[in-house]
Image (cartoon, rainbow, N blue to C red):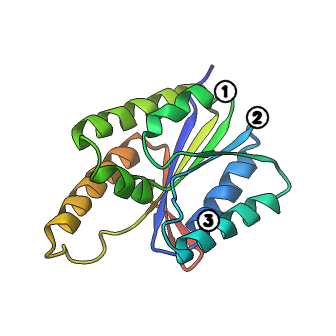
Amino acid sequence: MVRGKLVFITGGVRSGKSSFAEHYLMNEQARRNVYVASGVAVDGEMAKRIERHQEDRENYPVEWMTIEQSRHFEQIVSQIQEGDGILWDCVTTWLANELYESNMVEVEKQLYHAIDQLIEKAKVVVIVSNEVLDEPLSTYESVVLYQKWIGRIHQQLVAKADYAFEMEYGISHQWK
């Protein structure tokens, strides 16, 4: 099988990333549309956002298979079939879930290995992440650590990506 396409989409909170990613994937006409959700409903606002995303997918003309995977992203590989379209939403949430409970050096290696495996198996892999590096570095050590990891992960994913988009105000800008 031909190597699948990797698409990276970033942007600020509520910039239209998820909707753009969902439509991008649906246009690819993959065998199955697989939504990998990293969000955990830790508060009312997050619960509402998760519910809204679920309702959006229910109203689309295609069927979605959802995998809830807040940590250990590599575990989804065994659930993916040849020719699937995968949408992972999102890297920043996943990183926050992993950062304080894992050996991040090992987690990062596992992430890139899993992405490589998915690209070999799937028709297209669409990865969504929040742009959190537009602001100055924080003075809080834990936030600086998060910014360091997300910056490196974003750079690696974009380097692997066939296409990279940034969303602003519901408008996409293609960087790669």
Can residue 119 be seen in the rendering of this structure? no
Mark 2: give few (<14), some (14-19) or many (20+) Cα within 10 Å.
few
Q: Is residue 106 left or right of residue 139?
A: right
Q: Nearer the viewer, mark 2 or mark 3?
A: 3
Q: 10 Å neighbourhood of mark 3: few (<14), some, or many (≥20)? A: some
Q: Is residue 113 left or right of residue 152?
A: right
Residue 81: which disc? 1
Residue at the disc numbered 2: 31
Residue 66 to residue 137: above or below = above
Q: Report how far apart the C-alphas of labels 1 and 3 lie in the structure.
A: 25 Å
- The vertical placement of 165 against 69, above or below, is below
**Label 3: element kind:** helix
Q: Could you tell me which residue is drawn at 26 percent across and 51 percent down?
A: 152
Other-residue count near label 1 (Cα within 10 Å), few / some / many at <14 / 14–19 / ≥20 = some
- Among numbered discs 2 and 3, the one appearing first in the sequence: 2
Residue nearer the viewer, 130 or 40: 40
Q: Nearer the viewer, mark 1 or mark 3?
A: 3
| Callout 1–callout 2 Cβ contact below 8 Å | yes
**Residue type indicated by callout 1:** Gln
Q: Tell me the tag on residue 50.
A: 3
Residue at horizontal 45%, vertical 44%?
Answer: 161
Q: Tell me if residue 138 comes above or below residue 158 in the rendering.
A: below
C-beta proximity under 8 Å, tags 2 and 3: no
User: Toward the viewer: 156 or 14?
Assistant: 14
Q: Position of residue 10 (x, y in %)?
A: 46, 62
Q: Quadrant of residue 97?
A: bottom left
41 horizontally vs 23: left or right: left
Q: Amino acid at mark 3?
A: Ile
Which quadrant of the figure has residue 141? bottom left
Q: Where residue 18 sits in the image (x, y, percent)? A: 60, 63
Mark 2, secondary structure of its residue: loop
